[in-house]
Image (cartoon, rainbow, N blue to C red):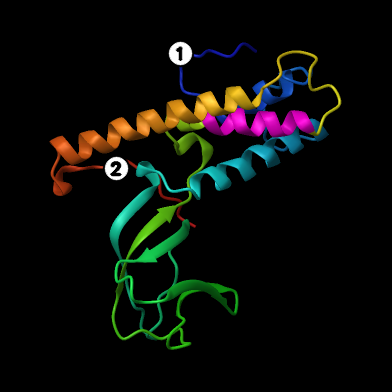
Amino acid sequence: MAYDPMVATTKLDAVNQMLMSIGRNPVSTITDSTITAVRIAIEQLDRTVREVLAIGWQFNTDTEYELTVDGSGEIPVPAGLIDLAPCDRLRDITIRDDSGTLKLYDRDEQSFTFAASVEADVIWAFEFEECPEAVRQYIFTRAARRFQKTNVASQVLHEFTQDDEMFAERLARKREGRRRRRNILTHGSNQIVHLRHINPT
């Protein structure tokens, strides 16, 4: 199964690149795999996705996002929200678990109860294939390098090095910088559209 660099990298592509880098044969599916190396590669890729997205990129952040109060006077955390920073920097608000439900918590008041909605700059979680291609390349290169370190056969084929990871990160950040400049210089805030897949869960 050859990897085609001219199309967007799928999660299967990324896992196969990780497998081939330690001398393992590529697989045709990663759904319900019983192969230990495949499961480990998937876990490493998923961890790296969460880690990289937690940085906060243009494509997975919203500024002045309104988090609304529910009928109980509390603010449940929307599905997929990783982190937030209140727009009112004087407020000390964080995310806490309350009986199995993530909610906003006012540290100053030591309370889950809010009198009004809260505006915050927020960071969202996405799946690997929902990320821009440059970020996918950075993620799987970073994941592959870590994957290789845990395998004795890590130099059988191609070894992903720290230089590879740094190069992929520079490309992702360069693309990110171009997108930010275009939004600021040529688009009004009400003209910017982000196409996202929202999980129903």
Q: Residues within 10 Å of mark 2 (few under 14, many from 20)?
A: few
Secondary structure category for the residue under label 1: loop
Q: Is residue 45 magenta?
A: no
Residue carrying label 1: 6
Look at the numbered discs 1 and 2 and tell me whether their residues touch, using CB distance below 8 Å: no
Q: Main secondary structure of the magenta part?
A: helix
Residue carrying label 2: 194
The residue depicted at 48 percent of the width and 87 percent of the height is 110
Q: Is residue 12 visible?
A: no
The residue depicted at 15 percent of the width and 43 percent of the height is 191
Residue closer to the observer: 2 or 53:
53
Q: Is residue 91 above or below residue 80?
A: below
Residue range of the region highlighted in magenta in the rendering: 138-149
Residue closer to the observer: 60 or 57:
57
Rendering coords of residue 138 (x, y %): 53, 30
Q: Is residue 190 visible?
A: yes
- The quadrant in which residue 30 appears is top right
Q: Is residue 144 magenta?
A: yes
Secondary structure category for the residue under label 2: loop
- The quadrant in which residue 192 appears is top left
Q: Residues within 10 Å of mark 1 (few under 14, many from 20)?
A: few
The residue depicted at 63 percent of the width and 45 percent of the height is 47
The residue depicted at 48 percent of the width and 48 percent of the height is 55
Rendering coords of residue 132 (x, y %): 42, 32
Q: Is residue 164 left or right of residue 75?
A: right
Q: Amino acid at mark 1?
A: Met
Q: Which mark is residue 100?
A: none
Residue situated furthest right in the rendering: 152
Q: Is residue 133 above or below residue 119?
A: above
